[in-house]
Image (cartoon, grey):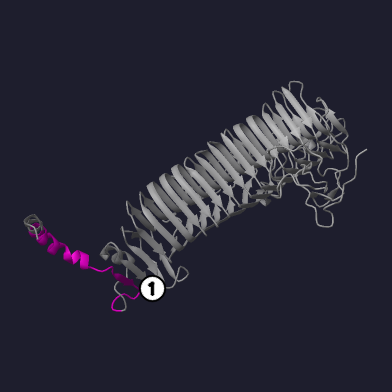
Amino acid sequence: MKPINRLILALLLPLLVLMLPAFATAEAFITVCVSGPPTCDYASIQAAIDAANFGDTIVVSAGTYTEQLTLKSGVTLTSTDGPTSTIVTALFSPIISGGQIISVAVNGLSIQGNSALTTPVGLDFFSSTLTLSNIIISDLQGATGTAVYTDGADAIGLRLTGESDLVLANVTIQNISGGNGLLGSGATGGDAFGLWADGAGSVSMTTTTVRHVVGGNAGTLTNGPFICEGAGGSSFGGRVSGDIDLSIANSTITDLVAGEPCYAYAMYCVGYAGQVSGIEASGGALVLSDNILSNFASWAAWESASNYAIHTVSTRQVRLERNQIAAMLVHDTWSARHLAAPDSPYCDPPPASFIDVEADGGAALYATDNSLRDLTGAGLDGQTIGLQATGVTSVTLSQNTIASINSSTGKASIGSGIRIVQAVTVTVNANRIEQLVGGNATEPYYASIASPSGGSVDGINLQDVAHATIANNIVWSLTGGNGAPQLSFGPIGNGGDATALKVATSSAQVWNNTLVQTTPGYGATDGLTGTASSIKIGAGTSLFAFNNILTGHDVAITGASMIITSQLGYNDLWNNHINYAGVVSGTLDLHVDPRFIDVAHGDFHLAFSSPLVDRGLTPIFPSEDLDGNLRPIDGNGDGVPITDIGAYEYQPTPLHRYYLPVTLQ
């Protein structure tokens, strides 16, 4: 050994001897049970945490432990019998907390609230890195308002602040309720959050359930027969803000209910309901895949915020894949306690707006293979929209189904399947939008105050889009709302419009869409029937439309007087009252029965005898049809593959491979 190495060894040897006990210490298992020693090491979970070292595991036996827990870095907390048998509760909140801890895991516990007065928060972490698995967080309720503090208190299942990284796996968060506002004070009900996170970092949720999250009711103060004060609390399945990347997969968010609004003495004088939002995300990035969001309910009330299944604001990116969103409903604000109250001549039926997905600002939105169904709004000026993007730079929507949007009663001003405003690049490809219904007008009693016209609906609505490609979509069965009868005074009740594709102040290429059956709303006596259009081209628009099927409309293609340019060709316009209005007919447009497989049941594949097989213009895009089949193929067996007209490319069977479709005369 060289002298220099001997010198280094001589210097390091005393240090190695001192450190040897630390290296020799094995990771320990510490046991906790209700009975305590000698059956186990501790009767208190917190005592075990205090005694644990980094890397130790605390094993908790079945039982109920009433204590607040403060976690420690590097310590794993697990149970022997799972969350249904191992319960942690506390007299004060939060029940479990930790600040600036790392490498922490909690598994197999049920965290339960003990009192609405003292435990409205289940878990609370600051600037920490931890994993929660096989956990139940439940029964947390904010306190009702008092004479000292009239608002109801918030309730939070899990709160995360600072710069943190959180992983949730097989976690259930349930029965979270905001406190009610003090009745007669005009107070606000408390909000309810399944998950609330603010700061930076990441949250990852898999196989997690958030359910029964309810906002607190307003503390109604009535200032006469037509005026009330107080607001319902909101309900959030998950709300993140700051710079947090949120990822949710294979999870369920269900049974969210907003807090009741304030009620005046008169029937429709109702205001300030709580908001419902399944996922509310601002900043960061959001990725949702294979989730179910269902059974959200709000209340019809004036001056209330819109309700959402998914709402994002100024995010870096939003990616939605294979999610199912269903059953967004509106509670009637007319309850049994108000049966004796009169209709008010000063208050119209209050609105409630539901938007399944809204992206407000941000760099990019990608939505693929999602199902958005059973959406209902209500009241004067309520809105019902399947998917809306406003101010998002890039929007890509593909293989989504948006169905059964019903604006209910009360003139919904906007009812849309897809609505995109102020974007640079937009691709809407291979989506199916169907069964949209505008709201019927308000009752005649209110016609002197509010417009009695029916609500309008749009399948796809683009405004201020620099570059849009709309291809391979099916839009089917849109119906405008009906107008209300005119009184001896007031405006006339016109019917609402129904439009499959509306484009304004935009540049759009429209290829291979199938747009079927729009029906106008009917006007009341002396009122006008609405318009029913397949494609409506607004002012300041440049539009190219080729290979589309437009059938079952009052007007197939209509254009405003200030269109920049429109080029049409190879479209099939069939069974429309008017084919062209304000635009020049297209080059080589057809006017023949497309011969769908089953119109009554919405099957718009082309039959083997369809004259639209191999009759379109073959573009570079789209290279696939709505089913994902390649375009073009040789559908009529003449050896030349040519794109079909419509959303589907005909797929010949061996029997029909050499069948030549009907020849046009």
Is residue 631 part of the magenta span, yes or no? no
**Mark 1 Cα-neighbour bin, 10 Å: few <14, some 14–19, many ≥20:** many
Locate residue 462, reporting x and y percent. Answer: 67, 33
Q: Which residues are magenta?
A: 9-38
Is residue 311 depicted above or below 252 in this figure? above
Q: Residue furthest top?
A: 562
Is residue 12 part of the magenta span, yes or no? yes
Locate residue 537, reporting x and y percent. Answer: 74, 28
Is residue 69 depicted above or below 622 in this figure? below
Locate residue 530, reporting x and y percent. Answer: 81, 33
The residue closer to the viewer here, 185 or 189, is 189
Q: Secondary structure at mark 1?
A: loop
Is residue 494 depicted above or below 252 in this figure? above
Locate residue 444, reporting x and y percent. Answer: 79, 36
Residue type at numbered disc 1 = Ser
Q: Residue furthest front?
A: 639
Q: Left or right of 93: which side holds 257?
A: right
Q: Left or right of 421: which side holds 656?
A: right
Q: Left or right of 176: which side holds 540?
A: right
Q: Residue furthest bottom?
A: 39
Residue at x-position 60% and y-position 45%: 367
- Picture quarter with the C terminus: top right
Tell me the residue that label 1 is attached to: 61
